[in-house]
Amino acid sequence: MADSTEPTKEELAAALAKERAEQDALPYKWSQVLEELTVIVPVPQGTRARDLSVVISPKKISVGLKGQDPVLVGDLYKDIKVDDSTWTLDDQKEVTVTLAKSNNMEWWPHVVTSAPKIDVTKITPENSKLSDLDGETRSMVEKMMFDQQQKQLGKPTSDERKKQDIMKKFQAQHPELDFSKAKFS
């Protein structure tokens, strides 16, 4: 029998369909990576940059045509870095806004707080290659991968191996001590 706190496949599918319908109904499309959000706002074919009103501040956004209600307007989910954020008019038919997140370690459930949310727990980030990482990050990830593999095999992690090596050296240097009842964890 299924645990009553876990949603059924049907409930998950319905929630996903509802979320997709809500996102499709927005007058803009958006996507994100951890560092930034990209928002694409359609405008009438032939629009020129001078026809646009684009306002980006740390906490708010407004995108639309001058003299008309904005297509996208509202309070941003979280603060952004305005100086690292940009907008462009592409093919005179859509405005692409790139918002640099102030906290580039979290997923946003929506661009503006008035919009429907997405379930950020369902986001699967792109796989990155270890070679893409800087040296320090790469060695940390490699250590974590090694430790995970060791745990799965029931073997000691790198830290546990270090402790064991230190204890062996200490025991060798002090044969007069009795370690028979010592517990090492």
Image (cartoon, rainbow, N blue to C red):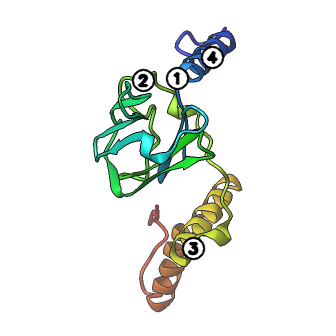
Pick the front one: 100 or 9? 100
154 over 139 or under it: above or below:
above
Residue carrying label 4: 12
Please tell me the numbered disc located at residue 65: none
* Of the two numbered discs 2 and 4 in the rendering, the one whose residue sits closer to the viewer: 2
Residue carrying label 3: 139
CA–CA distance between discs 4 and 1?
A: 22 Å
* Of the two numbered discs 4 and 1 in the rendering, the one whose residue sits closer to the viewer: 1
Residue lying farthest to the right in this orientation: 153
For the residue carrying disc 3, how many other residues have a C-alpha within 10 Å: few (<14), some (14-19), or many (20+)? few
179 over 75 or under it: above or below:
below
Tag 2: residue type? Ala
Tag 3: residue type? Ser
Relative image position of residue 121 (x, y in whole percent)? 53, 33
Helix, strand or loop under label 3: helix
* Of the two numbered discs 3 and 4 in the rendering, the one whose residue sits closer to the viewer: 4
Lower position in the chain sequence, tag 1 or tag 3: 1
Tell me if label 2 and label 1 are in contact, CB under 8 Å: yes
Tag 4: residue type? Leu
Lower position in the chain sequence, tag 2 or tag 4: 4
Relative image position of residue 82 (x, y in whole percent)? 33, 54
For the residue carrying disc 4, how many other residues have a C-alpha within 10 Å: few (<14), some (14-19), or many (20+)? few
CA–CA distance between discs 3 and 4?
A: 38 Å
Residue carrying label 1: 26
